[in-house]
Amino acid sequence: MAVRTDLPELTDLLPTADVVDVKTATGTVTLREFIAGSLGSSPIWIKALFAVRIVVAKALRLDTAWVPPQPRLRPETVSFTPGDPAAFFEVVRGEEDHYLLLKVTDNHLIGYLAYITDDASPDRNFKVVTLVHYLRPVGRFYYTAISPFHHLVIHNMIRSGLRANR
């Protein structure tokens, strides 16, 4: 896999990532608003996907068969402190007004979700990056199966993040 050079915030993770997916967006929200809006989005169709995921996760004997309920994030409650929760993720690291790296670990893969912006102008450019590290063969099978839905979910999260201050 070729290592991307346009994601300096993630250079330590890129060489060993099995999946790197980057989506971009432009909007007038702050990074905190974008993150809170995107992680707080849960329309009925996403809830239905997670219900199906529970069945699949149990069949594959994944550790995270259930998605724990989390309080809705607000921009002022988005943490950049390593170890803090953010939805069902854990904060790995971040820098206010620049980026936030989140992580979820299971027995089959480690997933990272990064929000990055370098833009302080009213129309900010955002990158939403998904990194996946397979821990065992079922991780590849699982991600291949959910990949089409992953793209739909991420696009929904981006739309919700861009609407956060409306």
Image (cartoon, rainbow, N blue to C red):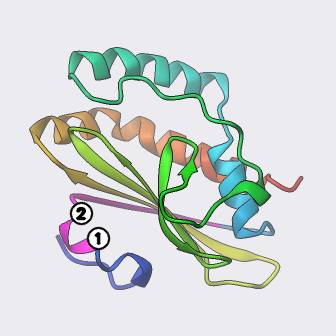
Rendered residue at 79%/52% (across/down)? 163
Contact between marks 1 and 2 (CB within 8 A): the answer is yes
* Residue farthest toward the right in the current orientation of the protein: 166
Quadrant assignment for the N terminus: bottom left
Q: Residues within 10 Å of mark 2 (few under 14, many from 20)?
A: some
Q: Seen in the image, is 101 located left or right of residue 134? A: right
Please say whether residue 40 is one of the residues in the magenta stretch.
no
The residue at which mark 1 appears reads as 13
Along the line of sight, the residue nearer the viewer: 127 or 12: 12
Position of residue 135 measured from the top left corner of the image (x, y, whole percent): 16, 47
The residue at which mark 2 appears reads as 17
Image height of 100 relative to 122, above or below: above
Q: CA distance from mark 1 to mark 2?
A: 6 Å
Q: Residues within 10 Å of mark 1 (few under 14, many from 20)?
A: some
The secondary structure type at the circle numbered 1 is: loop
Q: Label for residue 120?
A: none
Position of residue 71 measured from the top left corner of the image (x, y, whole percent): 68, 36
Along the line of sight, the residue nearer the viewer: 7 or 76: 76
Rendered residue at 48%/24% (across/down)? 50
Rendered residue at 35%/41% (across/down)? 147
Instruction: Look at the image and give the residue range highlighted in magenta.
Output: 14-25
Position of residue 158 measured from the top left corner of the image (x, y, whole percent): 63, 53
